[in-house]
Amino acid sequence: MIDAKLVGDLRARTGAGIVDCKKALVEADGDIEKAIEILRKTGAIKAAKKNAERQTTEGLIEAYVHSNGKVGAMIELQCETDFVARNADFHELAHDIAMQIVAMSPLYVSPDQVPAELVEKEMSIYMGEESLANKPEEIKKKIVDGKLNKWYEEICLLNQLWMKDDSMTIGQLIERKIATIGEKIVIARFTRFELAAGPEVCE
């Protein structure tokens, strides 16, 4: 079983997709340096770099309001061309993500948008738990990392399990759509509205 934190670290270092990172780590028996070499050989890093350089100047604004009329969301989903922006699959993806925002109330798009001071505060809470007091530092770090990843799953849209299929995250759903549609897709920002509450905006 490959740890999600390890996958995240490899992805941060290479820019390769989650699926490619997992495959490489499995093949490398969890050795991140060997996994990087595998990604280089398969061309995944080069493809990721090329994808990162591609511009998302098109897209759409999708809105979803729950049937009770008391909660809703708007999302700006970006792609590369107007052709894809008018594609039914792209519209469906935007609608599904807007529904996810309404149902699961994320606060940020991804972990890198979470303020550092907030992460540090959360980590200090975990580190201060009595159950960790007598554990070795290495074990303690693994437990804290696991709790932090779980926290990201709650507050970060891309890390949340998709409400329609909890075998994948929203990030994985988008990567699957990218593979199908053939263009880079980015969640630029979202806003969640709830009656009698202020709007939550993430950019």
Image: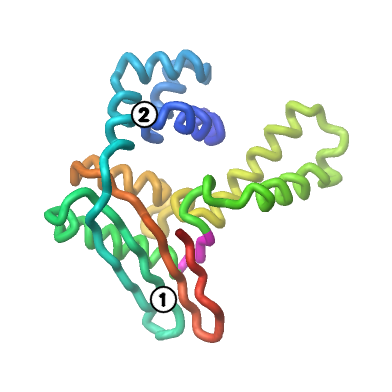
Circle 1 — which element?
strand
At x 51%, y 19%, the residue is 32
Which amino acid, by three-letter code, is at mark 1?
Answer: Gly
User: Does label 2 or label 1 sit earlier along the sequence?
Assistant: 2
Q: Quadrant of the C terminus?
A: bottom left
Residue type highlighted by circle 2? Asp
Q: Which residues are magenta?
A: 103-107
- Of residues 62 and 189, the one nearer the viewer is 189
Q: Say if 3 sits above or below 96 in the image.
A: above
Q: Is residue 46 above or below residue 200?
A: above
Label 1 CA crowd tier, 10 Å (few <14, some 14–19, many 20+): many
Q: Is residue 105 magenta?
A: yes
Q: Position of residue 100 (x, y in %)?
A: 41, 63
Badge 2: few (under 14), some or many (20 or more) residues near its Cα, within 10 Å? some
Give left or right: position of 120 versus 171.
Answer: right
Disc 2 element: helix
Q: Residue at x 32, y 14 (%)?
A: 41
Position of 8 with respect to 170 (left or right) is right
Numbered label tally: 2
Q: Which mark is residue 20?
A: 2
Which label was assigned to residue 72? 1
For the residue pair 182 and 118, the one nearer the viewer reads as 118
Q: Is residue 3 above or below residue 158?
A: above
Most common secondary structure along the magenta stretch:
loop
Q: Would you say residue 94 sits in the magenta stretch?
A: no
* Residue 126 in the image, given as x and y percentages of width and height: 75, 46
Residue 93 bears which disc, if any?
Answer: none
Which residue is depicted at the point 49% across and 79% down? 194
Q: CA distance from mark 2 to mark 1?
A: 34 Å
Residue 72 % position (x, y): 41, 76
How far from the left and from the top, in percent, is residue 122?
71, 50
